[in-house]
Amino acid sequence: MDWNAFQLSLQLAAWTLILLLPIGIVTGRWLAKTQTRARPWLQAFFALPLVLPPTVVGYYLLVFTGTRSPIGEFIMSWFGVSLVFSFPGLVVASILVNLPFAILPVQRAFEAVSNELHDAAACCGMTPWQTFRRIEMPLAWPGVLSAAVLTLGHTLGEFGVVLMVGGNIPGETRTLSIAIFDRVQAFDPLSAGHMAGFLLLISLVTVALGYGVLERRGPQRQKSA
Amino acid sequence: MLSIFLEHDLPSLGVDFQLPIGTLSAIVGPSGSGKTSVLRAVAGLLNTERSRVSFDKDIWADTGARYFRPAYQRPLGFVSQTFGLFPHLTAVENVEAALTHLRRRERSREAQNCLDIVGIGGLADRRPNELSGGQSQRVAMARALARKPRLLLLDEPFSALDHSTRKRLRVELKRLQDALAMTVLFVTHDLDEAAELSETLVLLRRGKLIQQGPTRELLRRPSTVEAARLMNFANLAKAEWAGSDASGITLRWGDVLLTAAEGPKSRPDDTIHWTIRTSDVFLVKDNHPNESRLGTILPAKVVEVIEMGSSALVSVIVNNSGGEVLRLQLRPGALHRHHLSKGSPVRIALHAQAIVLLN
């Protein structure tokens, strides 16, 4: 069992969740309410990582964030880090591939909050921010929770993009899924099996906990909605 | 005055009217007439292309001055057709949601007080899914009243309720409006409901104002054919102007001469449309002692009798009118007293004051 790889996977999942969830809430809410004609294109853009092979996403990340690319040069000169073969690069890659998992459930949840409730809130004297905080968020939170669970689970198991962007550097970019691949390549099925089983268990518990919370709080909301 | 001027091209909306403050007014019209759009525009939930909305001297919207005050800054309460209760909040929390300007402790006390006023203080901890339609309506009403609004807007407030609840809540609305001396504007497609509750009536059709005025006056005297049709006047006929004198004007209806109390003193260019309410057409017995006071007496023949619980609708063909049919409303008792059935000869009276000429 590669505990370093497990720790790195947890760190990656945590950073992805912390940085992506606010992005998911803001973007999902905006997509739910916007009238722009570009909406189908924007939705398609955010859903792309679902349909593209991870190698394609990884390839473009390498091209656009490599140290010789304008973006890579800018990040190197301003922050002194390279996004290729580094943990910050893994976080950026993980955020990009998890966009659909963070945005789509949130968008659907905000779409389900009817305009009638917005009108009622406005006529109660609530500002748009108060309406968001007191009415929309409490009603849309199951969608936000789903987004968090999906993002967490998906990040823990992400392999293709992580390998493309981060490679296999122990302690820096070798996550649990890469470590499993590494052990299989090294004809060490026992270690690979342990880690695979562990990852399976962690993912199952994460998703089950999420569904458990939704089950407990969900029916009340469903009845009342 | 509550002044409402709204214009919009697609969908078409064009209204301009004033309503007295401190009274209960109703906007009536068929589906798609723009009633709800008017209400939403007054609330600030809809921004029409051209608008000017003011309450007393307080301007809420004026496109000429590029001014639009958002809904949350307008001193009003709004109850929608399906009440719009926040499903994740209890009844008292729903009301508290309208009291965010108060401190938390005051908020709870005031919210409970509002629920008590509408008679559901005991249901404070129930969520909307645990309330009946009537109870939900009361919570929505309590929430709308919580901010002590200057204007209360109600969009078809009783349409989702059963008949008995609707009747009870109408009485309560009237009682509340009297007690709080509040300006109430409500929208309905039910003319009977509007007639029962409102002091001022606004008739809309296809986004246009058809007529507006005191309810009693409007129900007696529609000004146009369209208004009469909207208010279900069953008797609509055409006649020729035949003269005028001090007692009114004379109309030629087929070969029959009728007298109307009010109308043009000189011959108009077009045919005159006229109407009379079914309840203003009276049956006259043969030996009536003062029949000259009843108005124009016309012989007729009954062609249809429809009994409907507390009243009966009788259709008669008036002799020499060119086969024109008039309808009159009778109590079932009168129906049997006059021994009316299809083919019975009768005499009807049309009083000059009851005949209304239409534009």
Image (spheres, rainbow, N blue to C red):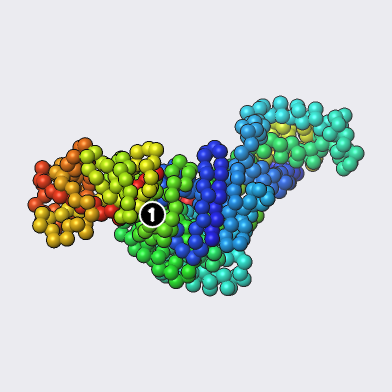
Q: Which residue is mark 1?
A: B218
Q: Secondary structure at mark 1?
A: helix
Relative to residue B74, is residue A55 drawn left or right?
right
Residue drawn at x 58%, y 45% is: B48
Q: Chain of mark 1?
A: B
Residue B332 visible somewhere in the drawing: no
Residue drawn at x 82%, y 36% is: A83
Residue drawn at x 61%, y 56% is: B60
Badge count: 1
Q: Nearer the viewer, residue B181 or B143?
A: B181
| Horizontal and vertical percent position of residue B165 | 34, 60
Residue drawn at x 65%, y 33% is: A38
| Horizontal and vertical percent position of residue B21 | 51, 63
Task: Please determine whether, in this image, residue A92 is positioned above or below residue B330.
Answer: above
Relative to residue B182, is residue B329 drawn left or right?
left
Q: Nearer the viewer, residue B140 or B184?
A: B184
Q: In which quadrant of the rendered view does residue B1 lie?
A: bottom right
Relative to residue A206, is residue B87 drawn left or right?
left
Crowd band around label 1 with a 10 angstrom C-alpha radius: few (<14), some (14–19), many (20+) = many
| Horizontal and vertical percent position of residue B314 | 18, 47
Residue B106 visible somewhere in the drawing: yes
Q: Nearer the viewer, residue A150 or B125?
A: B125
Q: Amino acid at mark 1?
A: Leu
Check the picture and name the quadrant holding the C terminus of chain B.
top left
